[in-house]
Image (cartoon, grey):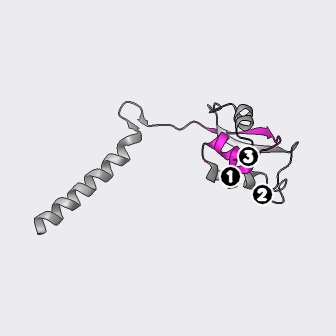
């Protein structure tokens, strides 16, 4: 029984060390993430904070990041209006994952 427990502990430590080694390059050291920059988004019809966070940050659940960066302009996070300008934080090498206008046209209300 002691041997089994010792084997399980040893295996768990080896898996932990493997997961930490994922971002390390032996020639250059730890991988460098690109810097973040702020860009301006002009709100259009049918925009919602979770749609914007899915578009810019690839995760609809991070809508609070946009809300917190623009909390002086947004009184209610459920109500944003066309013509508002929001600052959105993205990586400097960010590229649009899809055409937002075409997606909104194909999915008028999701």
On screen, residue 109 versus residue 17, left or right, reads right
Could you tell me if the residues under marks 1 and 2 are in contact, i.e. CB atoms within 8 Å?
A: yes
Residue hosting label 1: 63
Badge 2: residue crowd in 10 Å (few <14, some 14–19, many ≥20): some
View extreme (right): residue: 83
Which of discs 3 and 1 lies nearer the camera? The answer is: 3
Q: Quadrant of the N terminus?
A: bottom left
- Dot 1 lies on which element? helix
Residue hosting label 2: 77
Residue in view at x 78 percent, y 39 percent: 41
Q: Whole-Å distance between the Cαs marked 3 and 1?
A: 18 Å
Say if 32 sits above or below 49 in the image. above
Residue in view at x 61 percent, y 38 percent: 35
Q: Which residues are magenta?
A: 34-59
Q: Position of residue 38 (x, y in %)?
A: 72, 40
- Dot 3 lies on which element? loop
Closest to the observer, 46 or 41: 46
Q: Whole-Å distance between the Cαs marked 1 and 2?
A: 9 Å
| Mark before the other along the chain sequence, 1 or 2 | 1
Say if 35 sits above or below 17 in the image. above
Residue hosting label 3: 109
């Amino acid at each position: 029984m002691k041997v089994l427990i010792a084997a399980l502990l040893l295996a768990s430590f080896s898996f932990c060390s493997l997961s930490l080694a994922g971002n390390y390059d032996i020639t250059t050291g730890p991988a460098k993430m690109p810097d973040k920059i702020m860009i301006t988004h002009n709100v259009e019809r049918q925009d919602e904070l979770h749609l914007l966070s899915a578009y810019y940050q690839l995760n609809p659940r991070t809508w609070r990041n946009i809300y917190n960066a623009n909390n002086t302009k947004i009184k209610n996070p459920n109500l944003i209006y066309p013509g508002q300008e929001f600052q959105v934080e993205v990586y400097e090498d960010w590229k649009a994952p899809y055409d937002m206008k075409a997606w909104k046209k194909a999915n008028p209300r999701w």
